[in-house]
Image (cartoon, rainbow, N blue to C red):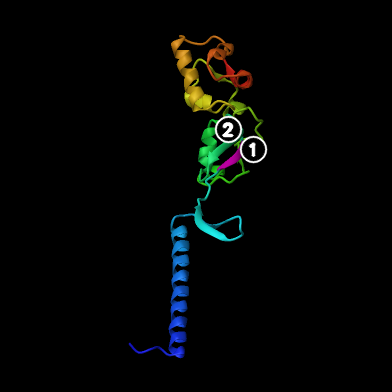
Amino acid sequence: MPELSRTQLLVYGAVGVALLLVGARWVRSASAEAGREGGGTTAAAVDDEGGSGESFVVEPGGGDVVVHVAGAVRDPGVYRFPTGSRVADAVDRAGGATGAAAVDGINLAARLADGQQVVMPSRAAGSGTAVGTASGAASEGPISLGTATVEQLDTIEGIGPVTAQEIVEFRDESGGVSSVEDLDEISGIGPATMDALRGALQP
C-alpha cells in the first residue's frame, strides 16, 4: 500500500471532522424533534462543572381555572373548573339558572378563562319589574298555592323548575297546603326563598 502524502492526510482528516460535525448536528435535531412530537419541551441538564449533561423533556402543565359565577343563579360563588370548561358548566355548578334568568342573554358555549366573572342576566333587569316579583304576578296578583302549576311557580324569583315540582308534589302528597309557611318543610327552601314565596303566593 503506497504511503499517503501529507496533503492527502490533511484532506482525509478534514473530511472526517466534517462528517463528525454533521452527525452530531443530526443527532441534536432528531432529539429536539422527538421532544416536540411528545408534547414537551427539551431542556439540557447542567452539571456542576458548567458543562451540558443529558437532555430531558418537560411535560406541559394542565392547570384549572377559577371563575366567579354571579347573577340569576341559585348558588352564586367562586368555583374551580378544569381547563377547557364552558360557561354552561359554570352555570350548572352554581345550581343552574333561576326562573328569572334571561338564559338567551349569555353565551353558554363560551370557554371559561381564569379570573373570569360569569354573570347570568335577569329578565327583570331594566324591565321596570321589581326584583323578586314575577312579571305575571305583578299584573295578576298573588298566585294561588292550591292551584299553582309548576310553570307558574317557576316564574317566582328564587324558584326553579326543580323546586317548583317539589312544591307541587308536597302539596299533592299532603292533600293540600293551608299556609305558605308549610312550604318551609321542603328541603332547599331557605329564609330568602320563603320571603319571595310569601310575596308571590296566597293559600
- For marks 1 and 2, the one nearer the N-term is 2
For disc 1, the marked residue is 127
Give the secondary structure at mark 2: loop
Q: Is residue 42 left or right of residue 122?
A: left
- Please give the name of the residue rendered at 55% of the width and 25% of the height, measured from the top-left corner: 159
The residue segment tinted magenta is 64-69
- Please give the name of the residue rendered at 51% of the width and 43% of the height, measured from the top-left corner: 85
Where does the image place residue 19, in percent across and percent down from the top left? 43, 76
Residue furthest toward the left?
1
| Kind of residue at disc 2 | Val
Give the secondary structure at mark 1: loop
Between 188 and 16, the one nearer to me in the picture = 16
For disc 2, the marked residue is 73
Magenta span has 87?
no
Quadrant in which the C terminus is drawn: top right
Q: Is residue 109 visible?
A: yes
